[in-house]
Image (cartoon, rainbow, N blue to C red):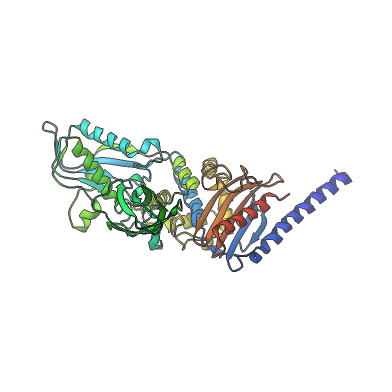
Amino acid sequence: MRLPFLRILSICFFSISTVFAQSGLQTYLNGLPSKTGIETALIGISVKSSDGTKIAGYNEDLLLSPASCQKLVTTSTALLMFGPDFQFKTYLQYDGSFDANSGTLKGNIFLRGGGDPTLGSEKFSSTLVDTLLSKLIAKVKALGVKKIEGQVIGDDEIFESIMAPGTWDWGDIGQYYGAGPSGLTICDNMVCYYLKSGNENSPTKFIRMQPYVPNITVINDVKSGVSKSGDDSFIFGSEYSYYRHIVGTVSGNEEEFKVKGSIPDPAWYAAYILDSVLRANSVTITKLPTTTRIMKENKMKYTSNDSRTKIATVYSPVLKNIIKQVNVHSNNLYAEQLHKYIAYSQNGFGSNISANEFIQTYWANKGIPSNELIPVDGSGLSRSNAISASALTDLLIKMQSEKYYSDFLSSLPVSGKSGTMISFGKGTILENNLTAKSGSMTRVRSYAGYVKAKTGKNLVFTILFNNYTCKNTEIRKICEEVIVKIAELN
């Protein structure tokens, strides 16, 4: 059947206008390097339709650091592997013999970590540390334990003992956002230091820490800044080291200014607080708390996991809620916990290197070239992560056809509405129309996600900027302008 002439003409006009719109976007992208502050930057941009058709791009195959957009790789992999309703498990166990008549346990209490990032966290009402400890104490009391002729042992053995990936910056490891993943994570592996500040340039005074972590020595060289200037302090200290050196400035004239850092040994701290609460509840314990790592280093024997008796199991929130924390609030620790747990699920041991290799192979089998997706951690905190804009866009496209896509999409922040995107695109075509993950670190800025164009077509995009020289506010404005141009395609 022959189409009427006017209908043919309208189809041709629509096709030509679409091509012009796309070529206009391409011309705009080609001209980006002329903008002040990004003349010498490395830029990778990929824009495609939901079916994978290329709309526009700029250096889309160039390998660049994605910063926190790396979390898209980690969370999508975990969601596809474990499903949205997966829950981590932490076990309370004992070894040795228990005399119910006297209430004496001739053995040890173990808190066996299962990689749960939320144990004792304030981010979920069900995981508060007081709630956790109350449950554990109740289980021990129900068993009838009055005396432990042994010790409380934190078992973090499902993950490697080196927590932070080797490519992380030294300046990040002591910060709360650089807390390393542990097989037995507790309270977000975070400790807060409170400083009293005065007039500008005057010394600050260390007041207290919360929670209290025994043995930490704080070297405080923080100066008072201008009033309401915020936090420009840095905490230096490695994992398992109890020396913390704090430098920089904080807002002046504050009675208590909170500076957030990482707990040196989460597994030991978990054992310590469980030990403390047991003692406070009239349980006698003959030895001090420790961990399997410390015992192994001191060549001390301890009972294997398979030979212990289970007292209780603690379940985490479901995975879809955990990955929402990762993506909406860009939680590095939770991403790293997922990353290592992916390796643990494959070979029974959570190492960073194994996770990197598995994730690369996993997506290669789904069509993402392995030479365009090179992960080195789960959160994007490492500058050594490398991905092309095209590969990340293709990954997001592939997620649309996966069983758990709706859970993945709902884990991402919405422009002008939630999380790290709450102020991005406000008052523009992007507000409530852009669902995306952002990423940033020094001289790195990235965005990747989904946006609906004026045509009604759903578009998928990735924007990666490395080594720009303009201010953060300026690169953010440029990125917003790029995505607005994408959304205005008609």
Q: How far across and down, in percent of the image, does residue 360 sit?
A: 48, 57
The image quadrant where one finds the N terminus is top right
Left or right of 178, for residue 240: left
Is residue 391 visible in the rendered image? The answer is yes
Residue at the spot 37% in from the left edge and 51% down from the top edge: 260
Can residue 164 be seen from the camera position used here? no
Residue 269 x/y as whole percent: 27, 48
Query: x%, y% of residue 18?
Result: 75, 52
Residue lying farthest to the left in this orientation = 102
Q: Nearer the viewer, residue 123 or 405?
A: 123
Q: Residue at x 23, y 44 (%)?
A: 110
- Identify the residue at image location x=57%, y=52%: 448
Of residue 239 and residue 347, the one placed in the foreground of this image is: 239
Image label count:
0
Q: Quadrant of residue 273?
A: top left
Above or below 102: residue 200: below
Image check: 448 left or right of 452?
Answer: left
Relative to residue 419, is residue 477 depicted above or below? below
Work out whether residue 420 or residue 408 is closer to the camera in this orientation and state it: 420
Question: Compared with residue 83, is residue 61 higher up or lower down, i.e. above or below?
Answer: below
Residue at left offset 59%, top offset 61%? 44
